[in-house]
Image (cartoon, rainbow, N blue to C red):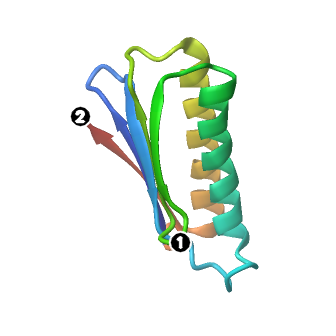
Amino acid sequence: MTKISIYKTKSGEYQKFTCNGHAGYADYGKDIVCAAISILVINTVNSLEEIAGEAIQVDADEEAGRISCTFLRQPLKEISSAFMDSLILGLSQIEAQYGNEHCKLTFEEV
């Protein structure tokens, strides 16, 4: 299962997100759920950096299926919040369609 955790402040400001594990929907190289999650997460990280110019710290271990993205400045730019909202929308739809045994989205207050 891939577990994605979104960390927000009490006031709703995004702080970071983490993505851990492999979806396990199909064999390696044929796992459409894992591929979809990866595309959403990596595109969000790239968009935060390249389009929004957001200050972020990214740590990744591709083999273990781990990536984390921490926001270094608060509050996020409006476009960055929109990218995060879009990430959550896409992940929520994957979770709804394929089940939380493959994709589990959680929210944590920090």
Vertically, is 87 above or below 101? above
Looking at the rendered structure, the secondary structure element under dot 1 is: loop
The residue at which mark 1 appears reads as: 63
Of circles 1 and 2, the one toward us is 1
Identity of the residue furthest to the bottom in this view: 27
Q: Label 2 crowding class (10 Å Cα cut-off): few <14, some 14-19, many 20+?
A: some
The residue under the point 54% across, 21% down is 54
Horizontal side of residue 84 vs 8, given as left or right: right
Horizontal side of residue 61 vs 109, given as left or right: right
Residue 90, percent from left and from top: 65, 46
Vertically, is 71 above or below 28? above
Residue 110, percent from left and from top: 23, 34
Q: Label 1 crowding class (10 Å Cα cut-off): few <14, some 14-19, many 20+?
A: few
Pointer 1 or 2: first along the chain: 1
**C-alpha span from label 1 to label 2:** 28 Å
**How many labels, in total?**
2
The residue under the point 26% across, 25% down is 10
Residue type of the residue flagged with mark 2? Val
Give me the disc on residue 33: none
The residue at which mark 2 appears reads as: 110
Q: 56 or 15, which is in the foreground? A: 56
The residue under the point 57% across, 79% down is 24
Residue 2, percent from left and from top: 50, 66
Residue type of the residue flagged with mark 1? Glu
Q: 9 or 77, which is in the foreground? A: 77
Horizontal side of residue 108 vs 102, given as left or right: left
Residue 17, percent from left and from top: 43, 43
Q: 11 or 2, which is in the foreground? A: 2
Q: Are marks 1 and 2 in contact (CB under 8 Å)?
A: no
Looking at the rendered structure, the secondary structure element under dot 2 is: loop
